[in-house]
Image: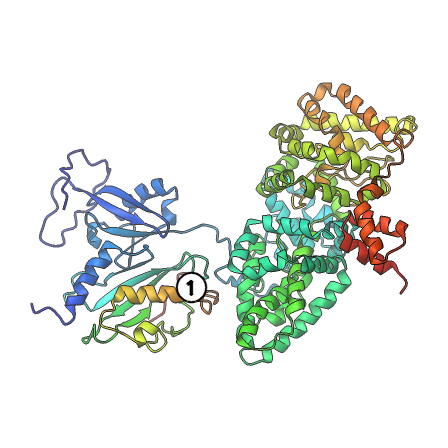
């Protein structure tokens, strides 16, 4: 099938997500393995050590829209988190507040987004924000 | 894809359901696939049948990573793998990587806000969660009896052999619940002298792993600790409860002012989570929650509950002090950077160290503690528990590694100030003594009830001797002989109490030498001196004593005689030791303008040679 838009980026992403690159602190994959459109992804960020997020696992939903990779994906935290740039009531990541989303380039990928979010967890302004009890999820 | 003709028989007891996804039917014999498991720290490869369940996979992992399966969380492609799933179900094939997070059971630092005791402002209520349900009075004296339910009481509750640190934490709870007791402790001269040594304090504080973690997160703390001036100032303040309260009040005021500054509230919050919360949680994890954990506006909560803050036995700054203190110090860093008012820097820093000092100070015994100690001595088992508590070990270790530290501490014991000769005696013995304390034989001997009993008998014998033939043992402390081992010794009696050698409480930086019990006259309530001042001289005898309880009289007697001779002022010349020792300091004091040599000397002795403290002492005593 004519690969769905952006699959030139998405398929490698898929493969990469499965192989698990980087330092093992972010993970991502298709939400539904049967999804041929490669649009809905789940991501996971492991809270960086020595921050308030330490040892926690944050689950995210990432949706690559039709214009992806020209347009940034739509990212939302499933696990409750208190962090700048993340809407505290529904976990939506504000694309204007996160630099990779705000200044998205089509060479970016889901991995980049997750890694950037994790990096932000380690920033001074975020690393000590009090967090909700572990394991809570946004209701939507 | 590397195919392993698996025929090496699947060791798996139960075959996971062959996932029928995709077209390929799973072969009759499962292939073994190699899956990499990656944690943030390490990476391991596992060969498992491809149709394993996640549960089975976790079992293999738990062996290699030495954790329990329920601590393991596996993540693949952004999804958490549930135990009942299979690897194939998630598409985990040969050569792929699965992420692993090992959940630690006990969060060392407070990451999650625990709203459990949000309402509990008074630690008295927080003290009850422990299984010790005996009416725990928070009054000062009953503290010894009531708080831990008397250790005997605890044993009746079946707690006797449990973790001593639990007991300790309870004691702490009680302690914190009672402001009067805090005051008593603070006023304890021994405590104060101990506090007068900034180096000591610093070491104690640094030795605590939780503290170290805290320092990792907040370098400002380590700066505070390393700044001798601040430490000293803090200690001074810690010694003076009234001053401390003043300062707390000031800080509280400053904090509430801070709140009104735009952005100040956030800064406060940050401060709170910055230092206070982890410390609180660390300190209070045994205490049933952090009463302030859920508090957003921490400033107001910092106030009235100060005395009821719990504190960790190990050298960890007193959370009580830090609520305003650490917040302030954190404020200093954040607010100065954000530009909002920060006139608090100095007070903040002091506050923080005050907390630290205060914390350690509260360790020491009070009259209440005395009875506690007594009870403990009656129960040798406790001693062993105590001794085996890890922090005690580390304390002892650090002490033995740092004989100077130990020397200082001992010397600071008011007992010694009265008897400089003894001090001199003790000094050389210290390292040996400390070694001894670490000697497992000693420890086991100490917990040996018969040994302890024998020692007690010795002590009693000495006591009798003292009363019968006082001339022979003018200022001898029977407790010494036994005290060395820190064994449970009964009250010393008329003899000069070299005092309860070291509170049982492990939190004493010096180690749990075991209380000689409330001793006679000048017995300073809590002498932490590493294992008793007079201990050292008898220490060498101790091992032989303890190991052969039945035949200790011989060597012991010899030592006693030696000690007696040493102590008998007649033989030993009136040692100019203090003068000699403090020669240098005296000169410095002279140069500074303190011309009263006598006063200088006394001040130096009292402060153990600490010039700065001596100066302040001198200044304090002058009429102007």
Q: Residue at x 91, y 29 (%)?
A: B470
Most foreground residue, B528 or A87: B528
Where is residue A10 drawn, in percent x and y? 18, 66
Where is residue B343 drawn, in percent x and y? 65, 74
Where is residue B344 drawn, in percent x and y? 65, 71
Please give left or right for residue B554 compared with residue A127 in the image.
right
Please give left or right for residue B545 compared with residue B61 in the image.
right
Most foreground residue, B378 or B411: B411
- Badge 1 marks a residue whose secondary structure is loop
Please give left or right for residue B408 compared with residue B59 in the image.
right
Identify the coloring.
Answer: rainbow
Q: Residue at x 62, y 49 (%)?
A: B314
Residue identifier under label 1: A122
Q: Quadrant of the C terminus of chain B?
A: bottom right
The relative height of residue B315 versus residue A86 in the rendered view (above or below) is above
Label 1 marks a residue whose chain is A
Would you say residue B523 is visible in this rendering?
A: no
The relative height of residue B229 versus residue B418 in the rendered view (above or below) is below
Would you say residue B89 is visible in this rendering?
A: yes
Where is residue B579 drawn, in percent x and y? 85, 43
Most foreground residue, B48 or B258: B258
The relative height of residue B54 versus residue B254 in the rendered view (above or below) is above
Q: Residue at x 63, y 73 (%)?
A: B255
Please give left or right for residue A51 compared with residue B535 in the image.
left
């Amino acid at each position: 099938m004519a690969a769905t838009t952006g699959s030139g980026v998405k398929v490698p992403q898929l493969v990469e997500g499965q192989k698990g690159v980087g330092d093992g602190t972010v993970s991502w994959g298709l939400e539904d393995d049967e999804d041929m459109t490669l649009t809905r992804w789940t991501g996971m960020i492991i809270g960086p050590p020595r921050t308030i997020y330490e040892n926690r696992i944050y689950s995210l939903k990432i949706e690559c829209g039709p214009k992806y990779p020209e347009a940034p994906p739509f990212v939302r935290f499933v696990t409750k988190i208190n962090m700048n740039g993340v809407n505290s009531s529904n976990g939506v990541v504000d694309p204007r507040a996160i630099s990779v989303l705000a200044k998205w380039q089509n060479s970016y990928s889901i991995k980049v987004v997750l890694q950037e979010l994790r990096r932000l967890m380690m920033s001074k302004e975020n690393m000590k924000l009090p967090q909700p009890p572990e394991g809570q999820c946004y209701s939507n | 894809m590397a195919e392993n003709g698996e025929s090496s028989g699947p060791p798996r007891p139960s075959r996971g359901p062959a996932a029928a996804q995709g077209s390929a039917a799973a072969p009759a014999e499962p292939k073994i696939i190699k899956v990499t498991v990656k944690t943030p720290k390490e990476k391991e490869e596992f060969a498992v049948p491809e149709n394993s369940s996640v549960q089975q996979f976790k079992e293999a992992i738990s062996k290699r990573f030495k954790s329990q399966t329920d601590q393991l969380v596996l993540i693949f492609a952004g999804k958490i793998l549930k135990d009942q799933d299979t690897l194939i179900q998630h598409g985990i094939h040969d050569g792929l990587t699965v992420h692993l997070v090992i959940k630690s059971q006990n969060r060392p630092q407070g990451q999650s806000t625990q709203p459990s005791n949000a309402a509990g402002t008074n630690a008295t209520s927080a003290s009850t969660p422990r299984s010790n349900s005996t009416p725990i009075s928070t009054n000062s004296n009953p503290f010894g009896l009531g708080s831990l339910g008397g250790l005997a009481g605890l044993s009746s509750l079946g707690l006797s052999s449990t973790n001593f640190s639990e007991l300790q934490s309870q004691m702490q709870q009680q302690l914190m619940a009672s402001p009067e007791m805090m005051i008593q402790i603070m006023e304890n001269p021994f405590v104060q002298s101990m506090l007068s040594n900034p180096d000591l304090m610093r070491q104690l504080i640094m030795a605590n792993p939780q503290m170290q973690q805290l320092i990792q997160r907040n370098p400002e703390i380590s700066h505070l600790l390393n700044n001798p001036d601040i430490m000293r100032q803090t200690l001074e303040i810690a010694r003076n409860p009234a001053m401390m309260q003043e300062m707390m009040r000031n800080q509280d005021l400053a904090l509430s002012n801070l709140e009104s500054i735009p952005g100040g509230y956030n800064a406060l919050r940050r401060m709170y989570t910055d230092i206070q919360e982890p410390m609180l949680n660390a300190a209070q994890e045994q205490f049933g929650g952090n009463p302030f954990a859920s508090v957003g506006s921490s400033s107001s909560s910092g106030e009235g509950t100060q005395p009821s803050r719990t504190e960790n036995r190990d050298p960890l700054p007193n959370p009580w002090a830090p609520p305003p203190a650490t917040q302030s110090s954190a404020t200093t860093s954040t607010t100065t950077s954000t530009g909002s008012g920060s006139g608090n820097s100095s007070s903040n820093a002091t506050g923080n160290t005050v907390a630290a000092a205060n914390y350690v100070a509260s360790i020491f015994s009070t009259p209440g503690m005395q009875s506690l100690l007594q009870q403990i001595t009656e129960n040798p088992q406790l001693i062993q528990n105590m001794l085996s508590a890890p922090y005690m070990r580390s304390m002892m270790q650090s002490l033995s590694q740092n004989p100077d530290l130990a020397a200082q501490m001992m010397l600071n014991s008011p007992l010694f100030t009265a008897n400089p000769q003894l001090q001199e005696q003790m000094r050389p013995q210290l390292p040996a003594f400390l070694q001894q304390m670490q000697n497992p034989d000693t420890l086991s001997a100490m917990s040996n009830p018969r040994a302890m009993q024998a020692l007690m008998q010795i002590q009693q014998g000495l006591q009798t001797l003292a009363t019968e033939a006082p001339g022979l043992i003018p200022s001898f402390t029977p407790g010494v002989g036994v005290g060395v081992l820190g064994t449970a010794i009964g009250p010393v009696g008329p003899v000069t109490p070299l005092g309860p050698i070291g509170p049982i409480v492990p939190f004493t930086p010096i180690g749990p030498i075991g209380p000689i019990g409330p001793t006679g006259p000048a017995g300073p309530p809590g002498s932490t001196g590493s294992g008793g001042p007079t201990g050292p001289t008898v220490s060498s005898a101790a091992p032989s004593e303890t190991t052969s309880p039945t035949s200790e009289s011989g060597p012991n007697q010899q030592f006693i005689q030696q000690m007696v001779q040493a102590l008998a002022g007649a033989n030993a010349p009136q040692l100019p030791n203090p003068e000699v020792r403090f020669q240098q300091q005296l000169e410095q004091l002279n140069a500074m303008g303190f011309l009263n040599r006598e006063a200088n000397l006394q001040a130096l002795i009292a402060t153990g040679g600490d010039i700065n403290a001596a100066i302040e002492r001198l200044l304090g005593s002058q009429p102007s």
